[in-house]
Image (cartoon, coloured by chain):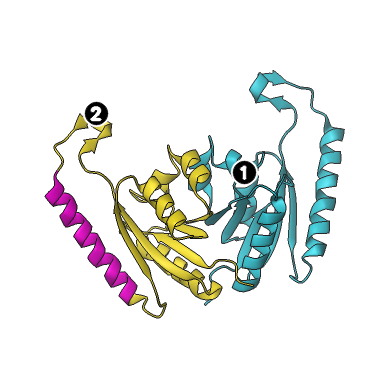
Chain colours: A yellow, B cyan
Amino acid sequence: MQTYRHILLALDFGPGHEQVLERATALAQTEGARLSLIHVVEFLHVDLANELVLPQDVALESQIMATARRKLARIATEIGALEDIGQWVELGSTKQEIIRIAEQEQVDLIVIGSHGRHGLGRLLGATANAVLHGAPCDVLAVRIRPEA
Amino acid sequence: MQTYRHILLALDFGPGHEQVLERATALAQTEGARLSLIHVVEFLHVDLANELVLPQDVALESQIMATARRKLARIATEIGALEDIGQWVELGSTKQEIIRIAEQEQVDLIVIGSHGRHGLGRLLGATANAVLHGAPCDVLAVRIRPEA
């Protein structure tokens, strides 16, 4: 019996994200599921912590997104045994973009690391209820262990 | 490649818990993992919402726990194709007891429904950070859909 058909892995490229990648890849293989990758670049021009609105630096955002696209493409190549890997680099709110793509692509499992700047610490901290009520599917929080 | 070896399914017997059971059972089968069941009976004698300390009703607690043990045993029999199903009925804090048994039994995945009185709504509401920092392993939140 196939449990999941389409897994969306949210990657933040932070410390230990390889552990989350490894877990999601293994799960996609055992479940026979399609795997897609998403990385969200948060808007840079609003610094809520300091209540300071910075001038929007479009060139910097474009550069960061281009770098993220290259990273995702390299990861997709490395796990190339799995065919048809969707790759999404989005600009906006991490929570909203993950949920939007999950709905759009009819994902049935979101996989996310349990710490990291854009990881579960962020997603399930202040916005825990919003994500869980918003997510159209199951959510797997992968515990990131300190690197040996 | 085996992703998970021991899955702990937290059940609350609330609406839709069959969906969580079905998902966890299917996952245990495809992953070749052992499955254990836990149900936590919260302490009855402290009513925090009303700041009222009720007299402890030991007989009632015992009765509720006995009923829970029978329910878990019936569920274990129903999914009997999986051998060696651990069954835990604990009294205390849902969060603490799930984490305690997960550590004690060297569980590598906790599965829990995404709503219900003792489900994810409770676990990942006010105590989200505590659970996520406390959990020794991955956590899968299964989205419960309204019954058709």
- Mark 2 Cα-neighbour bin, 10 Å: few <14, some 14–19, many ≥20: few
Secondary structure under the numbered disc 2 in the rendered image: loop
- What distance separates the C-alpha of mark 1 from that of mark 2? 34 Å
Q: Which mark is residue A51?
A: 2
Q: Which subunit holds the residue at mark 1?
A: B
Please provide percent x and percent y for residue A131: 47, 44
Q: Which mark is residue B115?
A: 1
Please provide percent x and percent y for residue A48: 27, 33
Q: Is residue B131 above or below residue B108?
A: above
Q: Is residue A2 left or right of residue A55?
A: right
- Quarter holding the N terminus of chain A is bottom right
Q: Nearer the viewer, residue A43 or A18?
A: A43
Amino acid at circle 2: Glu
Q: Which subunit holds the residue at mark 2?
A: A
- Mark 1 Cα-neighbour bin, 10 Å: few <14, some 14–19, many ≥20: many
Please provide percent x and percent y for residue B129: 48, 41
Q: Nearer the viewer, residue B144 or B12?
A: B144
Q: Is residue A60 above or below residue B27?
A: above
Q: Residue at x 33, y 76 (%)?
A: A78
Amino acid at circle 1: His
For the record, the magenta segment spans A57-77
